[in-house]
Amino acid sequence: MPGNRMPLVSIIVPCYNEQNTIGLLLTAIHQQSFDRLNMEVIVADGLSEDRTRENIMHFQQAHPDLSIKIVNNEKRTIPSGLNEAIRASGGNILFVLTLIVFRTQITSNAAWRRLLQGRGIMWEASGRYNPVDLDGLPGRSLQPLPILSVWVMLVTGWEETHRWSTRFPLLIQRTLFDRIGLFDETLLTNEDYELNVRIRQAGGSVWLDPRIRSRYFARTSFKQLTRQYWRYGYWKGRMIRRYPGTIRWRQLLPPLFIAGLLFLSLLAIWISWARWLSLAVVGVYLITLILAGIKLAINKRDFPIIIGLPLAISVMHISWGSAFLWNYISKPDTS
């Protein structure tokens, strides 16, 4: 950093084997209108086995006006990477990205202005981001479905706040971690939600700025999508077991759907109406998804989406709901 001046903003990025996407992220960061002399990038690399580090160093050589530092993430988990990068950072404001939003191209500078010019004491911020995938059918099917990402803020007297669930990326004042601690490394996923809980317990609230937008590169295969949402569902269950008061009705819908179908399937062995009811439930579910797929395919002139959207949505629901239930069957949370 020129003149040994401490940066105002530290961008925190955990990564592992991201040779194809690290350049997109660094380019997006470099294109931000925020003063690069007041910004640094801390990449916590999980000892990547591809060309991730080499690509980072090449980018740094080509863009010496952006400070980039690589630290080792020996544990190779997202929360451990986040914590390693936070410890190595020097900024008063931390822009935190996870592997999910790591594949993000930031398309709005409103985040910086919101935090720097906002009223009250803001701890976190985010907005809307859309999944993008030009190659795989899952991404093409989910691309038009906006994913709400919110910024958790501790606000003093701000009338515009709303209570949403937190999502990455996060724009955070460093004093947050001084007050409530770093990310919980016992949670391999949902560490953002757990942080959100502690923020609320400290008096925080959640606020969404729809003007802040970014793009998220979705999974390229249904196998990857299945593994992703199984992991999400399992660790969401672990989180809720730890903080049962945080559960929301919408989070219960996928596991209740799976449990209901299993129950009806068992009853169907002996009771005929249970067989017909289970078929009706599945039929209505699939027809709804197929109709949505037809409408989307016509709008985009991409007819494989007729199959892609029902598959993608059902994979997400079934994987998430099944993993959530499996969490309660597996060994108890002793943390």
Image (tube, rainbow, N blue to C red):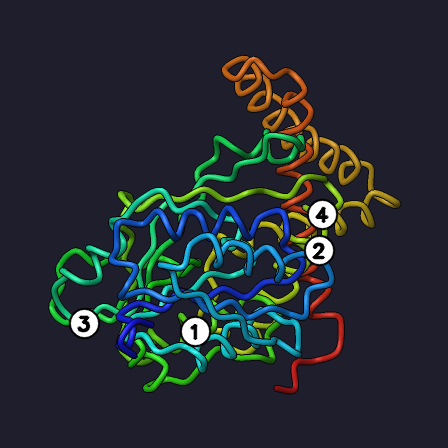
Residue holding disc 2: 322
Q: Please report contact status of discs 3 and 2: CB closer than 8 Å, yes or no.
A: no
Visible residue check, residue 240: no
Whichever of callouts 1 and 4 sits on the residue coming sooner in the sequence is 1
**In 3D space, how far apart are the residues under numbered discs 4 and 2 (Cα atoms)?**
16 Å
Whichever of callouts 3 and 2 sits on the residue coming sooner in the sequence is 3
Whichever of callouts 3 and 4 sits on the residue coming sooner in the sequence is 3
Whichever of callouts 3 and 1 sits on the residue coming sooner in the sequence is 3
Q: Secondary structure at mark 3?
A: loop
- Residue 22 is situated, as x and y percent measured from the top left of the image, at 55, 53
Q: Please report contact status of discs 4 and 2: CB closer than 8 Å, yes or no.
A: no
Q: Residue at x 57, y 17 (%)?
A: 297
Q: Quadrant of residue 142?
A: top right
Q: What's the amino acid at mark 3? A: Ile
Q: Please report contact status of discs 3 and 1: CB closer than 8 Å, yes or no.
A: no
Q: Please report contact status of discs 1 and 4: CB closer than 8 Å, yes or no.
A: no
Q: What's the amino acid at mark 2? A: Ser
* Mark carried by residue 195: 1
Packing grade of label 2 (10 A; few <14, some 14-19, many >=20) is many
* Mark carried by residue 121: 3
Q: Residue at x 34, y 86 (%)?
A: 178
- Residue 116 is situated, as x and y percent measured from the top left of the image, at 18, 63
Whichever of callouts 4 and 2 sits on the residue coming sooner in the sequence is 4
**In 3D space, how far apart are the residues under numbered discs 1 and 4 (Cα atoms)?**
26 Å
**In 3D space, how far apart are the residues under numbered discs 3 and 4 (Cα atoms)?**
39 Å
Visible residue check, residue 26: yes
Residue holding disc 4: 224
